[in-house]
Image: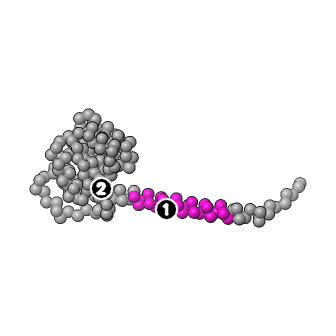
């Protein structure tokens, strides 16, 4: 459980991503939203927080976010619906589920919806910070993979273009073997 006086100043988690993470926080309990927003802001992230699913969905439809942190047990629409809609609107968004009602939503269903991670209430601030760091690392790896994919794609195009030029240059220079009649 997150405690107001918990000493987390000296904690160091790997955070190699130089850019801030844009986080949308959704929970129907204002104290939870405030605590999550404080921790995420202290970690250097840009935070937008909501206690209403419909308002959060409007924000997801109009602004880009890197991470959605949501409670599952929300008034309509519930957290699962918000996750599905967030993934439809922003396919690359990461999701971190924070729930005290694990039994209502089987873990397999949560993972199939595209969730990157799950934290069960009550939780410690250290766990939240570790999950944020893990999400940042995953984001960095995906960014690196995309850059490598793009570089490979560009390199492949250059190679194919070069081979096409060589084939055109060889046209007419290659003799076909004479056909031997039986």
Residue 58 sits above or below residue 16 on the image: above
Location of mark 1 (residue): 151
Q: In the image, 86: left or right of 164?
A: left
Location of mark 2 (residue): 21
> Mark 1 falls on what kind of element?
helix
Residue at x-position 56% and y-position 61%: 156
Classed neighbour count for the residue bearing mark 1: other residues with Cα under 10 Å, few (<14), some (14–19), many (≥20): few
**Residue 147, picture quadrant:** bottom left
Q: CA distance from mark 2 to mark 1?
A: 25 Å
Residue 73 visible, this orientation: no
Q: Main secondary structure of the magenta part?
A: helix
Percent x, y for residue 89?
37, 43
Residue 81 sits above or below residue 19 on the image: above
* Magenta-colored span: 143-166
Quadrant placement of the C terminus: bottom right
Residue at x-position 23% and y-position 44%: 50
Q: In the image, 60: left or right of 43?
A: right
Percent x, y for residue 75?
23, 35
């Amino acid at each position: 459980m997150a405690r107001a006086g918990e000493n987390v100043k000296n904690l160091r988690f790997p955070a190699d991503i130089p850019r801030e993470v844009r986080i949308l926080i959704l929970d129907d309990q204002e104290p939870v939203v405030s605590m999550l927003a404080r921790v995420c802001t202290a970690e250097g992230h840009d935070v937008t927080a909501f206690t209403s699913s419909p308002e959060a969905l409007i924000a997801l439809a109009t602004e880009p976010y890197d991470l959605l942190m949501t409670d599952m047990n929300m008034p309509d629409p519930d957290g699962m619906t918000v996750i599905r809609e967030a993934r439809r609107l922003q396919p690359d968004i990461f999701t971190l589920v924070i729930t005290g009602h694990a039994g209502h939503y089987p873990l397999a269903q949560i993972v199939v919806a595209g969730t990157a991670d799950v934290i069960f209430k009550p939780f410690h601030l250290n766990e939240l910070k570790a999950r944020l760091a893990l999400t940042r690392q995953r984001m960095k790896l995906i960014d690196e993979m995309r850059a490598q994919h793009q570089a490979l794609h560009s390199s492949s195009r250059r190679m194919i273009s070069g081979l096409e030029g060589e084939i055109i240059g060889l046209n007419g220079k290659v003799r076909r073997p004479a056909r031997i009649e039986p």
